[in-house]
Amino acid sequence: MVQAYILIQTEVGKASLVAEAISQIPGVIQAEDVTGPYDVIVRAQADTVDELGRMVVAKVQQVEGITRTLTCPIVHL
């Protein structure tokens, strides 16, 4: 299992709508509105890195109101 945090910037006033839409995507564990340089932070999981990448590109980035994403895979050192 691979997990990652996805940091999301949205259009002004769209953070809560984006977080709500993303929370419905299979594989998303949590989606929260935050303050600071990012508007939404998501924790997601998938079986492989490739599946995680496909989820981000094919599902998360397609949500209306998103302007930029940054995916940060979790590592266990």
Image (cartoon, rainbow, N blue to C red):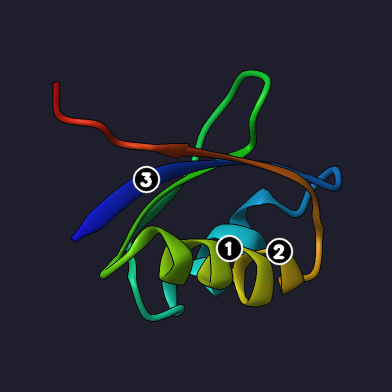
Q: Position of residue 39 (x, y in %)?
A: 64, 37
Between the C-alphas of marks 3 and 2, the distance is 15 Å
Q: Are marks 3 and 1 in contact (CB under 8 Å)?
A: no
* Front in this rendered view, residue 70 or 2: 2
Q: Position of residue 74 (x, y in %)?
A: 29, 36
> For the view shown, which residue lies furthest in the left direction?
77
Q: Secondary structure at mark 2?
A: helix
Q: Are marks 1 and 2 in contact (CB under 8 Å)?
A: yes
Say whether residue 20 is left or right of residue 58: left
Question: What residue is shown with label 1?
Answer: 56
Between the C-alphas of marks 3 and 1, the distance is 10 Å
Residue under the image location 52 percent in, 33 percent down:
34
Q: Position of residue 72 (x, y in %)?
A: 46, 35
- Badge number at residue 61: 2
Between the C-alphas of marks 1 and 2, the distance is 6 Å
Q: Position of residue 64 (x, y in %)?
A: 80, 70
Q: Secondary structure at mark 3?
A: strand
- Badge number at residue 12: none
- Badge number at residue 4: 3
